Image (cartoon, grey):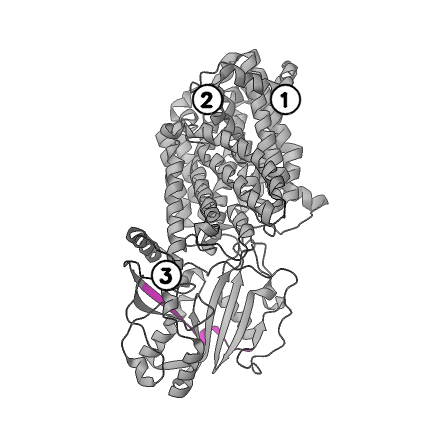
Amino acid sequence: MSDEPKPPVPASDAESDSHSSAEPQAAEEPPSTADEPLRHPSGPAETPSQISAADARPGDEMHASTGMFPVQSHAGGHQKDTNPTGKRLAILTLTALGVVYGDIGTSPLYSVKEIFGEMYGIEPTRGNVFGILSLIVWALTLVISVKYVSFILRADNRGEGGQFALLALIFPRGTPQSFTKGGVFVALALFGTALLYGDGIITPAMSVLGAMEGLEYAVPSLKAYIVPITVIILATLFAVQRFGTDLVGKAFGPLTLVWFITIAVLGAVEIVQQPSILAAVNPLYAVDFVRAHGSMAFFVLGSVVLVITGGEALYADMGHFGRKPIRYAWVLLVFPSLLLNYFGQGALLLENPAASKNPFFLLAPEWFLVPLLIISTLAAVVASQAMISGAFSTTRQGIALGFIPRMEIRHTSVQEEGQIYIPEVNWFIAVGCLFVVVGFKNTSALGAAYGIAVTGTMLITSILFYMVLRLRFRWEAWKAACLVSVFVTVDLFFFGANLVKLLHGGWVPMALGIVLFLLMLTWKRGRRLLMDRLADGTMPISLFLDGVEKSKVHRVAGTAVFMTGSDDGVPPVLLHHLKHNKVLHERVLLVSVKTADIPETNASERVRVTSLGHGFWRVVASYGFMQTPNVPNVLEVVDQMGIRCKPMETSYFLGRERLIPVGPRPGDKITLPRWRKVIFAILSRNARSATEFFCIPPNRVVELGTQIEF
C-alpha cells in the first residue's frame, strides 16, 4: 500500500510520507455497508446506561434507550404478530394470498398443458391422466404441505425466512471463510440465492405469457400479438416499480382471492361431470404411470415440477406475515383451489382429449373466456410483482450481510420500511425477463428453462435445514437424517429431471446463477482480504491518543464523524485528516455500523457509545439485516446522550480508495486470483457511495482519497 500516515508522536512524524490504509467498512468506498455479521445478544434488552456524557471516563459505555428512536414500522412492511387472531389473522391471511401464493397460484395456467405437450409425447389417455394427476397431488402434498408448511416454516430467524435466515441460524457468530469449517454451507446458501434471481427473471415471463396465450381462445384475431402484448405488460410493470407498490399492493390479496375462487369453481364444475377423476388421489396411479412409461416418467417430472414453483416463497416471505397466516391460507384456500382446478383439467381431458392443447382456458365456457383472460392477467401481474419485490428484499439482506455491493435503496413508502425499490436490480430483472420472452416466445419453449432454478433452491434449502435441525433444534443425527432424506430424495428427483433441460433452455437460469454466485463469493472474500490488509497497518487507539495529547494538536469547534468498519484501532481517514489538515475537532466520533444476524435490532440495543477520553468517542450502531442504516438518526441519539451533534455543526469524513490488485503476500489467510481481485476492484468502484447508503447529508461530507494495494 502507499501513502500510509504515521502516528502523530512526535508532531514531525505525522508529516512524513508513507503508506496509507483505508477503512474496510461503513464509510470507506470499496467495502460493503457493514461489518461482518454479529450474533446479537438474546434475552431482554440491556438497561440503558445511567452514565452521562459529562461524567463519562475513558472506557465507560452508554447505551440508547427505546424512547430515543422514532417509532418505525416493521421492516418487512407489516407489523409483526407472532400469534394473530380474529380480524388481524383474517387480514394477514388475505394479504398473504397475493404476496406468498401469487406464483404457485398461477401454475394451473401452463403446468398440465406442458405435461401433455409435444416434448414428452404423453397422450391424454385415462391411465395417463390419472397417473399425472396423482403425481401432481403428491408433489403438492410432499413438497408444499409436508416439507414447507409443516417443517421448513419452523426454521425462522426471529420471524424471518429465506436462505440468508437459514445461514444465520447455522452460523450465529458469523459466516466462516474456510470450506473445512463449514464454508460449504455458505457457498450453498449463496448459490441458492443466486438461482432465485434466475427464477425471478423467468417467473414474470412464464406467468404473463401463460395468461396471454388465452388470447388464442378468447380473441383469436390477436394470437399473433401475444408476444408484443406480453412485452408491453412486463415493460409497464417494471417501469412503475419506482413509484412503489403501496396502493397496488393493497389490492393483491382481494385479486388473488378472486383468482383462487375462480379456478376452484371452474374445476369443480368439470369434476361434477366426471366425479371418478377424484380417485387419482390414490398414489398407486402414480406408481402405475411410472411402471408403464419407465424412464420417460422421470423426464415428465421436469414439467410436473411446474405445479410447485413458487413453493420457496412460503418460507422466503414468512417475515412479512408470520407462519400462522401462511399456513391458514394454504390449508383453507390455496391447496383446495389448486386441487379442484387440476382435477377439473383432468376431468376435461377424460371427456375431450383434444383439450390438452390448453386445458385451463378450455375449462371455461365461451362467454367467460374474456373475463377469465382479464383475471388471469391480473393474477400473473400479482405473481410477477411478488417475485420482483422478493428480489428487492433479498438484495437488501445480501447487502447488509456483506455478500452484495452497496446499491441504491429507495423507500417508496413513508410508513412501511419494507417497501423498497432498487433500480439496479429492477432493470437487471427487466432486461433478462424481456429477453427470455422475445427469445422463447411461448410457455412451451420457456417451460424448458423453468424449474431448474426452483428445484436447485429447494434442494439447497433441504440440506441447510438438516444443519438447522441439528444445531438449532438439537435433533439427533439419525432423526434429522431420516426426515431430511425424504425431502432430499424428492428434491433430487425433480432437480435431476430438470437437468436434462440444460440444452433446451435450462442453461439460462443455471448460467446466470453461476455468474451471480461467483460475483457474490468474490465480493465477500475480497472484503475479508481487504480488511486483513488494512488491519496490518491499523494504529492502536491508545497510542494515537497519547500522541494527540503530547503533540498538542489544535482543536476547533464542532463535531467530526469518522466512519470506520472496525470497532478497534484508528480509522485511516482520521490519520489522513490529521496529516494534511493539522487540526482536530472539539468532539471526534469514530462511528461503526454493524449488521446483526437478526432481521431487526431493538432500539435499546442499537447504539453503544464508549468514551475514549480527550474528546474522542467510539459509537457502534447495530442494525438488523432487514433494516436500513441511518447515521444522522444515530447521531440524534448520541446528541440526546449529551454529546453535542447538531447537524450544522457536524462534518463527516469519509475515505475514497483506489484499489490496486497485486500478487499474494506470505501469511495471507485468504487468497484470490488476480482476475478475481480485478472484478472486486470493479465492483468496489461502482458500488453506491457510503454518503448515499447511510443517508449522510452530502453537503456535510469531506472525502479523502488514497491508493491501496491488496
Q: Amino acid at mark 3?
A: Leu
Reading the image, the residue beneath label 3 is 530
Per the image, the residue denoted by label 1 is 281
The total number of labels drawn is 3
Q: Position of residue 515 (x, y in %)?
A: 36, 43
Kindly tell me whether residue 658 is visible in this rendering.
Answer: yes
Which of the two residues, 28 or 36, is positioned nearer the viewer here? Answer: 36
Mark 2 or mark 3, whichever is nearer to me: 3
Q: Magenta stretch: residue 645 in it? A: yes
Q: CA distance from mark 3 to mark 1?
A: 57 Å
Q: Residue at x 41, y 22 (%)?
A: 223
Q: Quadrant of residue 577?
A: bottom left
Mark found first going from the N terminus, 2 or 3: 2
Judge left or right: residue 51 versus residue 380.
right
**Relative to 86, is 313 on the left or the right?**
left
Q: Give the image quarter of residue 220.
A: top left
Helix, strand or loop status at disc 1: helix
Q: Where residue 292 appears, x then y in whole percent?
A: 52, 14
Q: Earlier in the sequence, mark 3 or mark 1?
A: 1
> Disc 3 on helix, strand or loop?
helix
**Magenta residue span:** 642-657
Q: 10 Å neighbourhood of mark 1: few (<14), some, or many (≥20)?
A: some
- Assign the N terminus to one quadrant of the image: bottom left
- Local crowd at mark 3 within 10 Å, few (<14), some, or many (≥20)? many
Disc 1 residue type? Val
Q: Which residue is mark 2?
A: 219
Amino acid type, residue under disc 2 in the picture: Val
CB-based contact (under 8 Å), mark 1 and mark 2: no
